[in-house]
Amino acid sequence: MQGVYVHIPFCHRKCGYCDFNSYAGLDALVEPFLSALIAEIEQSPYAGERFETIFFGGGTPTYLPGDALAQILERLARRFVIASDAEITCEANPGSVSLAQLQTMRRAGFNRLSFGVQSFDADELQRMDRMHTPDDVAQGVEWARAAGFDNLNLDLIFALPRQTLERWETNLQRAIALQPEHLSLYALMLEPNTRFYHLYQKGKLRLPDDETQVAMYRLAQQLTAQAGYQQYEISNYARAGYQCRHNLIYWRNEPYLGFGPGAVSYMGGKRWTNIKHPREYIRRALAGEPLELEWEQLTGWDAVAETLMLGLRLREGVDLTALENRYGMPVRERYASTMTQLARRGWLERTGETIRLTQEGLLWHSEVALAFFEK
Ligand code: SF4
C-alpha cells in the first residue's frame, strides 16, 4: 500500500506539550499556503502514482474551511490515482469544527475523522492549553455522525500533570461511551522546546510516577478490551475492520508521499523532509524551488532495523521470512543472539517465523528497537 500525507501547520494556539510543526498567529499565511500546497501537488514528480490512503494532519487541518480542504483533496485526485475505497482521514480539533464544514468534507470524500480530544477533564484541558471543553467533544462527534462519518478516532493522552488513575479511568470511560471506531491512547512525552518541558526542568510539573503510568496503560488495555476494541499497536485500539490503514503504512515501513511544510516522504527507499517553516515553504513552493530540507537513502541493515523497529509496534509482529525476502538479507542469522537475549528478558516472543513484543515488551519498545540497531 502507499499513502499521501498532507500537513496543515496552523493552530489556534500552541499547546503546552506540543512539538509538532504547528504555529499560532499565522492567519495571514493561510491563503498563500493554500496556493503553495496546490503548487507542490501540481509539481510532484509522482503524477499517476496510486495511493490507498490520504491523511490530513497538523497542526489543525480543520482550521481551514471545508471548501479549502475539499479543494486540496480534489487536486490530489487529479494528480494521482486514488483507490476508490481509499481511507481518507482528517484530523480535527473539537471546538474547531462546524456541522456545515464536516458535511462539506464528507461530500468531498473524507471518510474518517480523528479528533484530538486528549482529555475529558476541564482542568487537564486547561493545563494543556487546549482550546476546547469536554462538551465540545460530544458535540463534534454528534456533528461528525450527522455528517455521515462512520469511522471516527479519538486521541487521548495519559500520564498528564497531576492526573490520577481514577481521572484517567473517567477519561477512558467517557471516550468509550461516545462509541468511536478507533482509539489512540498515548502517554505524555516531554519534548524539548515545549512549555511542559521547561516547567519539568524547573521542577514545576507534577507527573504520575512510573508505577502509576504502567497502571494507566494496563487500564487502557483492559477497558478497551472489555468494550470490544482490539489492541493492534502499542497505543492504538480499533473495532474489527477499523484499524487505521494510513498508520499501518508507516508501521509496515511502506511508501508514503508528504505535502506541506515539514512533511516527510518515503518513496523508493529515499526518505526526505520538507522545509519546516510555512513562510519559507510558501516562498519556495511558489517559486518552484526544491522543498527538501534533508534526505537519506535507507538501505541494507538500516532499512531492516527500521522495519523491525516499526513493525514490532504492531501486535501482528514481524514475519522474519517476509522480511528476508523483502530486503534479501539473512535477518534470522544476524539477529539470532539479539532475539534470544530479548526473549530471555521476557520482551520478545516468537511463534513460527513471526516475532512480536510480549505484554511486558510493550512497555520496553524503545530498548527493543535499540537492540536491533546495534551493529
Ligand atoms: S492543536 Fe495539536 S498540533 Fe496544534 S498545538 Fe495543540 S497539540 Fe499541537
Image (cartoon, helix red, strand yellow):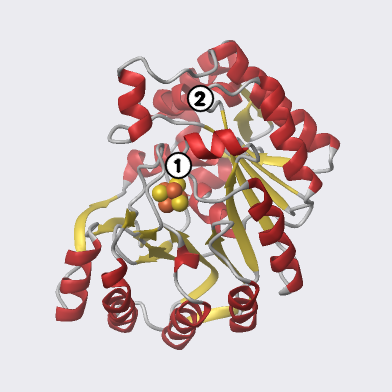
Residue in the picture at 44% in, 31% down: 189
Q: Secondary structure at mark 2?
A: loop
Q: Is mark 1 within 8 Å of ligand 1?
A: yes
User: Is residue 103 found left or right of 320 in the rendered image?
Assistant: right
Q: Which residue is mark 2?
A: 161
Neighbor class of circle 2 (other Cα within 10 Å; few <14, some 14-19, many 20+) is some
Residue in the picture at 54% in, 57% down: 93
> Decide: marks 2, 1 in contact (CB < 8 A)?
no
Q: Residue flagged by tag 1: what amino acid is it?
A: Asp
Give whichever of 322, 131 is nearer the camera: 131
Q: Position of residue 244 (x, y in %)?
A: 62, 55
Vertically, is 129 above or below 213?
Answer: below
Give whichever of 87, 191 is nearer the camera: 191
Q: Which mark is residue 129?
A: 1
> Is residue 375 among what the camera can see?
no
Q: Residue flagged by tag 2: what amino acid is it?
A: Pro
* Residues at marks 2 and 1, CA–CA distance in whole angstroms: 12 Å
